[in-house]
Amino acid sequence: MSSFPDSKVPSGPLQDKWTQHKFKSALINPKNKRRYTVLVVGSGLAGSSAAATLSELGYKVKCFCYQDSPRRAHSIAAQGGINAAKNYQNDGDSVYRLFYDTIKGGDYRSREANVYRLAEVSVNIIDQCVAQGVPFAREYGGLLDNRSFGGAQVSRTFYAAGQTGQQLLLGAYSALNKQIAAGAVKMYPRTEMLDLVLVDGHAKGIITRNLSTGKIERHAGDAVLLCTGGYGNVFFLSTNAMGCNVTATWRAHKRGAWFANPCYTQIHPTCIPRSGDYQSKLTLMSESLRNDGRVWVPKNAADCDKDPDSIPEEARDYFLERKYPSFGNLAPRDISSRAAKEACDDGRGVGPVVGSHREGVYLDFAESIRDFGEDTIRARYGNLFDMYSRITGENPYRTPMRIYPAVHYTMGGLWVDYNLMSSIPGLHVLGEANFSDHGANRLGASALMQGLADGYFVIPSTLPNYLAPQPPGQVKENHEAFAAAENDVRERINRFLKVNGKRSVDSFHRELGLLIWNKCGMARDREGLQEALKRLPEIRAEFWSNVRIPGGADQVNPELEKAGRVADFIEFGETMCLDALSREESCGGHFRTEYQTPDGEALRNDEQFAYVAAWEHTGENVAPKLHQEPLNFENVKLSVRSYK
Amino acid sequence: MESKLNLTLKVWRQSDRQSQGRLVTYPAEGIPTSASFLEMLDIVNEGLISNGEEPIAFDHDCREGICGSCSLVINGVPHGPEKATTSCQLHMRSFRNGDTIYIEPFRARAFPVVKDLVVDRSAFDRIQQSGGFISVRTGSAVEANSILVAKDDADHAFRAATCIGCGACVAACKNASAMLFVAAKVSHLNILPQGQPEKDERTIRMVQQMDAEGFGGCTNQYECEAVCPKEISVDFIGRLNRDYAAAAAAETVTA
């Protein structure tokens, strides 16, 4: 096994690591900063905050996004809130408690030092956002309001109604706009990164396609930051936006960046179920619904197509209350999701038959409406009930809602060290695109925190550690490495267009998604993963011989855009299944059915699997190589999560 | 209960910015009423692709009503017939079997067509760049709770800030005015204490940029409010006018 890149986690006490690291980090003279160009790919919370902050410091920044405006990146859709260890509620919160909760919530599969730093800078994020004018919820005295979220026992979540992600992104976008107006950031909307350019093993540029004109362009820089989000759309159906993709990180992986923990996926329990084969995406509803709704399915499969009102109390199975009497309907995301899947796999799901069976369970508010009145329930959840009824055409005040779990977030991503640098020197990875902070399961209200922590506060301090020893501007776009990478991109596009087969890109994407969902979704086993690994190369081969992409390369061509992304998802799916196969334990968002306790709970194996699995690309049609970064827990004691 | 619709679509097709566009008729058959409007277009596109034709291009991304990408004029109304609903959240149960549906892009001089139903709304970004921010460097912020914001003000600013920047307000206006968008963006920051130091400059600059982009003037028809998927109130336009008058007067005094 080759030596693992140094994770660069500083020595010393946990509480001092970040302070000491910042002190020991390299500095670049303000006059010299402007001679460095930083390429930022992606304009969500991580990308916008990094691009704005680095340009404030004096670096020349180019920022790229595939959307028509940086404000539309999918961070915009986050609902719940953002955690910060402010302890404004005086309820015993602290940086250490936020750190501890996040490590535990991640089922002990993340790095202590990274998570502690995240908790530490969380307080600065809130200050920054408020100063920008983010309209967080307030108390009557004018102070910031907090709520408890995702099962946390303290109230540390800051929020702006159900649109926290939107408001935080608009804040970061405004900071970005300020720098664009000052000429310090050059923004490239409707531009997709299609390859990474390496010079002497360092990331020194990217190849992009202008999605309006089809023009292929070269961009040279002194460092590259990937802030390109997660890979949830490998499942086709997810709560991600339609355009979310793995291409930037997968292309970087194929150029040498190691991919860490790709099998860690978060499944959110309260989404609106599929209604048919044409379904294009899934919609999340806030988990807060489970505070007042009771989850059930019929005891008897024969009752599944009956009007729920006609099913008497004794014929209903309130399965969460039955299995987890102390947490009941509030059991954590992974546990609730799996229980719903088990009920549906047992043939007791409700709602329309999609594919082979019914995928839905009831979330019933009848008892709460009876106890508190319809007005109270409307005040608590009115907007969610409206959304549900807009999508399903049903009235949840009269008929129980139907919910089913859906893919929501991916904890895996490109491997990074403490400086957020990948295994390719110069290539840095921020936000959901990296693997670093959430372990095997992400806690509610911590994704927004991580994106902004990385962009506003971590990368500005750590990037000089890479840049300072590099003479600025040493690589130009006429370097032969750019010509070679551009040629690769053009050849690939031509290959897509030449196939001229019979099937649409979407038909492959749906087939891929269904396979990954069934074999590498909420629960996986060896046999299923092996089947998937056999099937995936067949899908890949058929894709490259039978996909049909109308139109040309030098125009707006959504089918061509999707083809590139789906081809990468198919390849990525193989690594994801390999990772799931090699991790012979159940933890967080990774449930291997062979590894469970006698009463059906996840069975972690800390002796053998307390490591980060980082995969190295070793060539086409060759299995990637697994590297293990051991996780050392010096501060927290590993324990079993129990929600009985 | 689930039923299927047979529809006739009249869709704006235009190969690029320079070309002449036209309405093209397509049958849309067997459309489930539970499908979303964009899923209906997906189904039609699937058919076009299998015939070797170029699918209909349209902007879309989150498909949950928050990113502001989708931008369809459906039977003459931006985002279609349902109140407070983006095109992506509109569902086919709002239509009847046999309907003919006209689908066009958001039209305005400041929103040139890129292809088919895709328009260029970068004018909105440039308006935001002209002043839609508070100048605070990362790291220079004061402790969050040292800035008190009355709950009413915070809620008021939030209501303005819920604008998704889709541009339906412009598409609905006979003058193609962007006043509701600009009013929402200016008001969000002008209402808050953090936004006060740059209030006048922001207001003047954003209005100037709006005019420079070629948006029309506001004649108080309120079509913008009627189609806004986030129900942004036209009261913000009144507020913008007041802020603008005050800023212009202050500018005259100090000049």
Image (cartoon, rainbow, N blue to C red):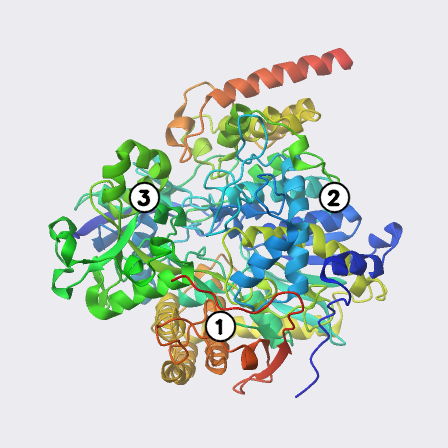
Q: Of the residues under marks 2 and 3, which one precedes in the sequence?
A: 3
Residue B158's spot in the image, x, y percent? 52, 32
Q: Residues within 10 Å of mark 1 (few under 14, many from 20)?
A: many
Q: Position of residue A403 (x, y in %)?
A: 30, 54
Instruction: Name the image quarter holding the C terminus of chain A.
Output: bottom left
Residue corresponding to mark 3 = B90
Q: Are marks 2 and 3 in contact (CB under 8 Å)?
A: no
Q: Which residue is mark 2?
A: B139
Residue A263's label in the rendered image is: 1
**Residue at image point 13% right, 60% down:** A303
Q: Chain of mark 2?
A: B
Label 3 neighbourhood size at 10 Å, few (<14), some (14-19), many (20+)? many
**Who's the residue at 72% across and 13% down the image?**
B252
Q: Amino acid at mark 2?
A: Gly
Q: Which subunit holds the residue at mark 3?
A: B
Q: Are marks 1 and 2 on the same chain?
A: no
- Secondary structure type for disc 1: loop
Q: CA distance from mark 3 to mark 1?
A: 34 Å
Using the rendered image, report if marks 3 and 1 lie on a common chain.
no
* Three-letter code for the amino acid on which mark 1 is drawn: Cys
- Which three-letter amino acid code belongs to the residue tagged 3? Leu
> Which of A487 and A302 lies nearest the eye of the viewer?
A302
Q: CA distance from mark 2 to mark 3?
A: 42 Å
Q: CA distance from mark 1 to mark 2?
A: 36 Å
